[in-house]
Image: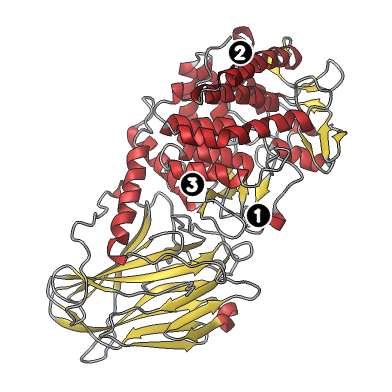
Amino acid sequence: MHPAVRFVILALSIGALAWGSDRACAEPATAPQDTDTRYFDLLDLHGTPRSAADRSFNIFFDAGSWHGYSLPPVDDPATGFTGPFVHSLRAGQWVGLRMAELQLQDAATHRSIALVPLESHAAPGYLVRSFHAPALAVNQTLFFADSWHALVRIELTSSTVQDVDLGIAGHVMPSLAAGLAREGNSVVQTFPGSRSKLTTRLHLDDVAAQRVMLSGASYRIDANQAMHLQPNQTVVVFVDQTLVYDSQAETPLPVDYANAWSRNRTRWTDYLKSLAASERPDLAEDVTRRVAVKAAMTLLGNWRAARGDLHHDGVIPSYANPDFNGFWAWDSWKHAAALAQFAPELARDQMRAMFDYQAADGMVPDCVFLEQAGNNWRDSKPPLAAWATLEIFRATGDTAFLAEMYDKLVRYHRWWFQARDHDHNGLAEYGSTDGTRKAAAWESGMDNAVRFDGIHMLQNVKNAWSIDQESVDLNAYLYEEKRDLAQMAEQLGRSQDQKQWLEEAAAMRRAIQARMFDPTSGYFFDAKLGRDERVRVYGSEGWAPLWAGVADTAQAAAVVRVMLDPGKFATFLPFPTLAKDDPKFSPIKGYWRGPVWLDQAYFAVEALRRYGYEQQANEMTRRLVLNARGLTEQAPLYENYDPLTGQGYQSRNFSWAAASYLLLLRQSASGAHDHGQIE
């Protein structure tokens, strides 16, 4: 059986029997209850879609789910939750308007019991709504048991003896009403051109019958036997909504309804304990904790389980953008580094998901999707994979993972010099497999950066092209990789490998210093191939050599002066990707021509720390946290920010912004990026 949305209602009571049957099972009374309200409503998750493609409000996903939900608008009195939004259906769309709408009647009079809303909250790992009626209190809690099953835990507490008829209603998008059908005791929703299914079923003990009714774009499932409520005893009812991406290939695991809520709470309690290390002496504890939890919720809200041609779980850049329904390479490396702090297995899988598609020559594609025909092989992305792997090892001590990844990382590292070193001088260039400037700029990750305005393409070998300049950030990352691979080799007992990596790193360091540092300007720049000419654009790439430990002390001091210049990079929200005084500085619509991208800001702070500028690093961290508009309030994290005002722009709920804040805030930030001694 391959159900897609199952409504499973199980009568569970703490104390007396609920449905008049002694066969009901009781949920363990020790199931933890979330009473800590500090993290309520870090994000506003209220909304209802105006169209199937509406992404104007925040959506709750968890546990790798491809379907998500929201709280109804604040003034909406009806029970239940908005949704689901199915992210795996085309570019993602709403297929339902409401699920788990509770229908209660007095069994004796058949009069409807009107429920009055009290509260509605989004919390780490769940959504919760509470209602009341005369002599009756009702709570609805939506959470995920796993990536397939979204459960609504309904608690009914009566102050008197009463018999209640219970039903559950749902409403789908009117344009999808033709896909509703009854299948035995289930309501099945299917979609044109898709093998995904949503199957709605009321699951009761065999002592109770059920009725399934369809009407246009609505359905209803009723229990034929009244629920007998005893005074001051809570009856727990579960609603289970399960999405199957491919009904011909998937068989979801059954849900342990009696323990699902407890396991969800345990999982999220562990996350929050791990995030407790997010403290900084120069920021209030409640600020750092709330920002860290919001960042973790953002990452886990973008977590998607292995489905289709995605063979491992990973994190998408943002569900709020229809273009981001897959895994990107350098996004993945940053996600993994942050996830290592609190969700290490997901961090490992994030790395595996990209390397599942490593080519025979070592290349890792730019991005991968549910259908691999959409994978982008025109370019790769900046080489931070070894850094991310080592971050996972530092957080977990998992030597087996190092051994699993080492040879793959070596092949990827060598690929850069085989396919992207046009003049074979040991310094690489960004490029593409199709010879286009656009794909080459994509490979940098800084798509429209000013430094690429004048590039030309040069062919290296078949299917391998370079731009005509050696990029300073790329080579700083490759230097970092050599150092990181040396540390891995040491852990794995490969002493000869370690020696070779360190020798190569030393040679590369000398080459970067000589070729890319401009003593007159006091900054690192890209260098034109074949001549002693630098691309004198002051961009965030110029501090990558400090992050990687390439610069000598004098060079670092010069670069830091530029970084801390209010006319260039020490802006209200610091470290824009292009200096403020550049004529092409465009902080709102410039994309990579002036906004603050949090990964580059994180690298800047770590660059300062590495060379001993601790006080300045702390001050810039304070600005990045306190001056990003809405970060310490309810606003979501954005793709990038205006350095002059702190306003967020582009995609909401952006994963690498979340990852960067987690890395910025971790307690051991000053020592977390251990590159060894500066030579």
Q: Residue at x 60, y 21 (%)?
A: 497
- In the picture, the disc for residue 323 is 1
156 lies left or right of 77: left
Q: Residue at x 52, y 51 (%)?
A: 313
The relative height of residue 218 versus residue 80 in the rendered view (above or below) is: below
2 or 3: tag closer to the N-terminus: 3
Depth check: 77 or 22 in front? 22
Q: Name the residue under label 3.
A: 299
Q: Distance between the residues labelled 1 and 2?
A: 38 Å
Residue 184: horizontal and vertical position, in percent?
A: 45, 86
Q: Residue at x 66, y 73 (%)?
A: 193
Cβ atoms under marks 2 and 3 closer than 8 Å: no
Q: Is mark 1 on a helix, strand or loop?
A: loop
Q: Which residue lies furthest to the top in this view?
A: 554
Q: Is mark 3 on a helix, strand or loop?
A: helix
Indicate the amino acid at tag 1: Asp
384 lies left or right of 255: right
The relative height of residue 196 versus residue 167 in the rendered view (above or below) is: above
